[in-house]
Amino acid sequence: MKSNSDRRSFLKTLGAGSFALPLISAIPQKPKEKYTGKKLGIALVGLGSYATQRIGVGLEGSEYWNVTGIVTGTPSKIPAWKEKWGIQDKNVFNYENFHKIKDAKDIDVVYICLPNSMHAEYTIKAAKAGKHVISEKPMATNVADAEAMVKACDEAGVKLAIGYRCHFEPFNMQIMKYAKEETFGHINFIESSFGFRIGDPKQWRLNGKLAGGGPLMDVGIYCINAARYVTNQEPVSVSANFGPITDPDRFGEVEESVTWHIEFPDKTLFHGASSYKTNIEKFHASGPKGWMETSPSFSYGPLKGQTSLGPMNLPIVQHQQYQMEGMGPLFLSKDPIPDHCSGLEGVKDMKILMAIYESARNGGKKIWL
Amino acid sequence: MKSNSDRRSFLKTLGAGSFALPLISAIPQKPKEKYTGKKLGIALVGLGSYATQRIGVGLEGSEYWNVTGIVTGTPSKIPAWKEKWGIQDKNVFNYENFHKIKDAKDIDVVYICLPNSMHAEYTIKAAKAGKHVISEKPMATNVADAEAMVKACDEAGVKLAIGYRCHFEPFNMQIMKYAKEETFGHINFIESSFGFRIGDPKQWRLNGKLAGGGPLMDVGIYCINAARYVTNQEPVSVSANFGPITDPDRFGEVEESVTWHIEFPDKTLFHGASSYKTNIEKFHASGPKGWMETSPSFSYGPLKGQTSLGPMNLPIVQHQQYQMEGMGPLFLSKDPIPDHCSGLEGVKDMKILMAIYESARNGGKKIWL
């Protein structure tokens, strides 16, 4: 964790809402008074399953947030949201009239849950409308778009956060803590892979233009981000290879699998894979004094962890609730969004993802960063 | 498993000896009468810790084997072996008079437990002395030596086996069985890594000439062999990269770490790493219907396994005893050594190991096999 403000926000007593949230015993707790000020109004952009079943659920009973707007191209989705959150008609937008969101004074933040390639466009539009933004990961499909998002938010004087929920999740926070405190010595080896067998061949994740890439953009990014939050460094080199295409119907536009070999300035070696043809989800890191491991590591849970000292006994939480309750104070504060979930953090990941693709397109050629 | 003879041998009732050996319940058992014929005389060449604490222990109480000779350059090691096995003075050799082993009629087989680069020399010498040979893995330090070993044994009319003990070990045999029966569908993704933090910087494993390579030759070979016995194919391409050197004192002559990306004819992707700077030992394979995983996977045990169907409840055995009791009938039989632990099997692995090194020396260039 790179700032104190977000840690404090996370460590508050999360008592409200539809989930019983035990605290992370491993991280010292500072009791905090319950927030009773005006809630932040948030509008969800894109009402797919992530918005509906994850973020929308995570926001239930929130101490900080109230869903005051929605943006959707599918009118049939509107009534359920209106009923659940009491959203006014004036705050229901579609993609044609999205710019009018600037007039909705009760919307402070928009959360972009659209396919990857649309994050940049709607982040920039939201910034121009004077709204703070949370964009899902990957923040964009290329570095230029990612940088344009940061610039647009800076110029508009609004905040930009990326939905890096692992930074608010107990197992991943514990992994960060172990690394920072060198519980297992200075980490020098990381192996992490994330993949799943993808279903519907017509989904946007397999559309090159919408997704910007395959499993690497979708889930491999978690491994990359984890290697960075464990080493607290930026890689110096990337070598990568695409796996073979076994299913040309699904994988005409995005990779089916990719493996990488990444090196950090302190000579930590990080290798792994991402794939849409296997269910795998692992994070392993070791140093001279031992190892730590999670599997599942990054998905919605329940996560599980083990170290050379024993099992990681940590609470199983609703990740999006922890993320949103953690992010509330970041948007209420006058301080900038802390590094770990900032737009610049997203840009750093994007540069690595693009280097992996560049190397793999060039037959594994080493790319220096 | 590629032959019936070795399976039968493995499935016999292993009642004798100093270990209680439960049978593998997952593999159908054919009861077999205890062997009561003349035991094979075996001479161990190189009395280091592997010969003494592993093979020597595995041979205790054997149904098939009697240790009738030793070859050592260290006279102080002789008395304990003579006392334990009743070895005659005439059957105690050193590296200068090794050729005289040809006159020892009560030595049928020699087991080469020397540093890697010496396997070829002593295998060829043993073959010329008319002795069957078991060589530890890796069988040699280059393909030419490995092929010369096979040729020498063929020409001398003696058998050559490689100490591929995983082919006689319950967890690995079960993995092979799952793959063959397509319990999880046709395997299309394999991730396997094996490494350990190496100690004494003066040991032969870090000497380029004696070891022929670093962790890849020593333990990475298990991952490579496993990918082959699970896919039952030979790779078509190899891409690999060396990890950074963090300890130049230890790693002046052999690699510290290496990662690889290997593809098979059926488009199975296999990636992994081997390292002398981290304790890691994993095997994961998956297909469309599920996954199987071991960790630890290949070391002396206790091994542990898990699949998408549940835990692998298999006996914990002394691997070298299972190997030697499995190999006994192979040397008593008139049939050739079955593929899975033959010299040619060793040559196949050696070609892949060398391709990994060639690719890594060339910055990850894809090597076609």
Image (cartoon, coloured by chain):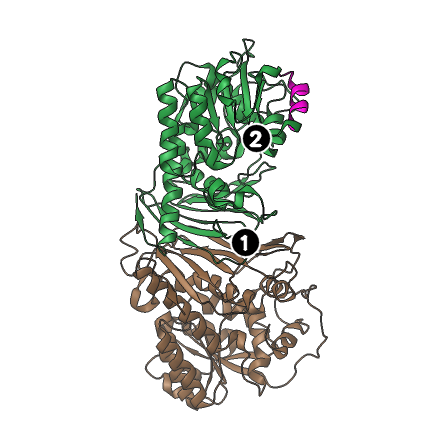
Chain colours: A brown, B green
**Furthest-top residue in view?**
B37
Mark 1 residue crowding within 10 angstroms, few (<14) / some (14–19) / many (20+)? many
Q: Is residue A94 visible?
A: no
Chain of the residue under the numbered disc 2 shown in the image: B
Please tell me whether residue B315 is drawn above or below residue A319 in the rendered image.
above
Q: Mark 1 falls on what kind of element?
A: loop
- Same chain letter for marks 2 and 1: no
Q: Amino acid at mark 2?
A: His
Residue A345: x percent and y percent? Answer: 48, 74
Q: Residue at x 58, y 60 (%)?
A: A187
Quarter in which the C terminus of chain B is drawn: top left
Q: Tell me which segment is drawn in magenta.
A: B77-87
Magenta-span inclusion, residue B213: no
Q: Mark 2 highlights which residue?
A: B319
Q: Quadrant of residue A1?
A: bottom right
Residue A349: x percent and y percent? Answer: 44, 70
Residue A293: x percent and y percent? Answer: 57, 54
Magenta-span inclusion, residue B85: yes
Q: Residue at x 46, y 71 (%)?
A: A80
Q: Amino acid at mark 1?
A: Ser
Q: Mark 2 falls on what kind of element?
A: helix
Q: Using residue B284 as the reference point, say whether residue B239 is left or right of it.
A: left
The residues tagged by marks 2 and 1 sit, at their Cα atoms, a distance apart of: 28 Å
Q: Quadrant of residue B322?
A: top right
Please tell me whether residue B360 is drawn above or below residue A174 in the rendered image.
above
Q: Residue at x 65, y 65 (%)?
A: A181
Q: Mark 1 highlights which residue?
A: A295
Q: Nearer the viewer, residue B252 or A211?
A: B252
Q: Using residue A3 as the reference point, say whether residue A150 is left or right of it.
A: left
